[in-house]
Image (cartoon, coloured by chain):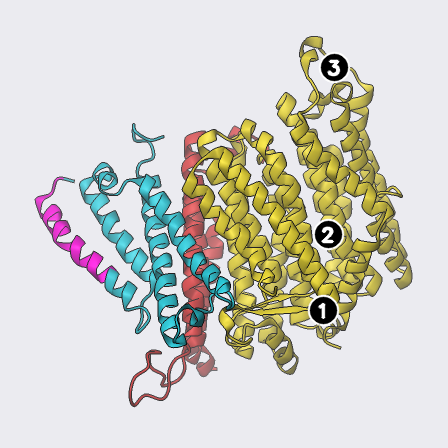
Chain colours: A cyan, B yellow, C red
Amino acid sequence: MNHTLLRTMTQLLIAPIMVFALYVQFHGDFGPGGGFQAGVIFAAAVILYGIVFGIRAAKKAIPDGILRAMAAFGVLLYGGVGVATMLLGGRYLEYGVLAHDPVHGQHYGIILVELGVGIAVASVMILIFYAFASRGEPDDR
Amino acid sequence: MDNLAVIQVLLPLLSAPLCLLFNKARLAWMIAVVVSWAALFVSLSLLVMVNDNGPIIYEQGGWPAPIGIVYHVDILTAFVLLIVTSIAAVVMPYAGKSVEKEIPVSKQPAFFSALLLCMAGLLGIVSTGDAFNVFVFLEISSLATYALLSQGKDRRSLTSTFQYLIMGTIGGTFILIGIGLIYMKTGTLNMADLADRLPAVFDSRTVHASFAFLTVGICLKLALFPLHLWLPNAYTYAPSVVTIFVAATSTKVAVYMLLRFSFTVFGVDLVFAKLPLTEVLLPLAIVGILVGSLAAIKQSNIKRMLAYSSVAQIGYMILGISFVSASGLTGGILHLFNHAIIKAALFMALGAVAYQIGSTHIDALKGLAKKMPWTFAGFAIGGLSIIGVPLTAGFVSKWYLVLAAIEKEWWIVVAVLLVGSLLAVIYIWRVVEVAYFQTADDESDIQVKEAPLQLLIPLWILVIANIYFGINTSLTVESASSAATMLLGANS
Amino acid sequence: MIDEIIGLYNYWVVIFLMMTGFYVVIASTNLVKKIIGLNIFQTSVFILYITMGKVADGTAPILEEGITSYSNPLPHVLILTAIVVGVATTAVGLALVVRIKEAYDTIEEDEIHDQDDSL
């Protein structure tokens, strides 16, 4: 799309969208928010970029190989927290054992789990967009 | 040690992203094999633990039951977990060779990842003690199944998967509505809590509607006759490994859901006394047995024939449930296990045929038994088992079903069971006759050889299991009958 | 009578959406329309859940001074999960439609049936 207005507005919008995504992500354990929402908002920024500047530019910014790894990593981070709590003698996802003070443990646990969810959701959403948008492109595998 | 209940589900769930992360076909396969055997070991230990010490209730995150989500492993759970993991443990080694031929290398890591996710979903449905979690795991396994089924080489795999996706999602959404309505009425999602609170409000229309939605949704998933339409096409065009795994496990897990919801959550006394569940399930099961078997006889694609035979066999399981008696339920639950090993063996034999000649059409099988003696001997023994010949596993479960029918003096049902077996003789005989007693049309494909050992060994493990569990029935019958007593005594 | 119609209006919305979605799934032959119908069908269930989470006079479930009555947040969480499931289902469904379009060059159900008469 070669519309100057669109391009400029998009450039202005993308950064605030990403910051908002991070706010929703890290504010999630005090107020409304969390990994799902943050991941989708973050993905929306990249998808907007991809729609306006073309799928190739988006793929140049965030290649899909990295996204694939990030999606897997997000799930593993979430599961890894659960495994870690089991190794520390608690139950699966019993965050209390993660720190000396159980309340701190709850904080660490939920932040890590939500981070895992956020990374996984954002990368999967962008991957879905890539998969549909680049269908039929010459560089499509 | 209690952690085993959650490790069972975590093993495949967390190894699925690992397959994707490393992105190497061989490595993904090896991960799948190791994980499936570890999962089998875990489920065996769970079965032993449950047998010795009674049910395990595992509180996730250390939150007690009504607040937190619990995993609830009792004897029935452990038995169904064993079915899923043991099938996975033989299918995964088999997959190494079979997938090589049917899935492009670049897609193999994702393929194994989806296979492990499907397994994780099925194990999760079985072990969770939370009604909403059932829906979540159901969708995990269903979505993985859609992805797997659509990988067939024939383009018809796409349309049949689409059909399944539509029907499966409607079924899943019905289950979601059902769970929502009972939550609305009781304010809890924990199954034990639901079982406590539902009797007080059982006579309301909300609860009845909820039960109807749940039953129809689950019956869609387990492909009970008239809701079976998605099954034959989906099984026929899928890659061999997927057909083996899905046919042997996912319908069994759906039957487990039906048992769990109608017997434990809603309560066997109330459901069968106040709602016409037997009156609905029994005729459908009978028609399913007859129609499924008759349709199987007409098929010219053997994979499709076995798929229709699955529709009939699901009828047997539902028949066992609709008796609501100890021996009927024992037969039904036993048939979950026996049908899993029978169907897995038959589909594995076909998978070996497809590996060697690339077709499962009946004309392609002419005289093939001479060239692939071990494969077809395995097919024949699996066939005997599905017919229900004594000394095979299939006989044991049918025996209990016949006993239950005689106990209730439902002579028509006894007749249907016998006719069903006779029809099975016909469709199995068609294959045996073509493979053993006809000669190939042209001699050009004389170079067809026996399937590689990597396919034959898993096949024969299952064939021997079919004979072993037909002779030594102590493990299966004991587990099934104590599960049946538990279900019947749950709320009385 | 009037109470049942007006007082329970959100349930009427649920039923209307559910039937609309179901009808679209069954009646349309276009595969994309079928998926849209499926989405409407699922959305009706989301509204059913959200409805049951509402507590009369309850506010948003955020801990705050001076507020005693909160709406039930659990159905919201449940339905967030269901929405994610719905998105995933839609993605898989549309991916299948893309592949079907490539294999058959059409997304009309009857034309696909004409091409291979097996279904």
* C62 relative to B425, above or below: below
For marks 2 and 3, give the CA distance.
37 Å
Please give the range of residues in magenta. Answer: A2-21
Residue B283 visible in the current orientation: no
Q: Say what amino acid the circle numbered 3 marks.
A: Ala
Give the mark nearer the N terminus: 2 vs 1.
1
What numbered label is drawn on residue B53? 1
Which numbered disc, 2 or 3, marks the residue closer to the eye? 2
| Mark 3 and mark 1: Cα distance apart in space | 58 Å
Front residue (pair B93, B394): B93
Give the residue at mark 2. B336
Q: CA distance from mark 2 to mark 1?
A: 24 Å
Chain letter belonging to callout 1: B
Q: Position of residue A121 (x, y in %)?
A: 36, 54
**Residue B392 position in % (x across, y down):** 84, 43
Foreground disc of the pair 3, 1:
1
Disc 3 to disc 1: CB gap under 8 Å: no
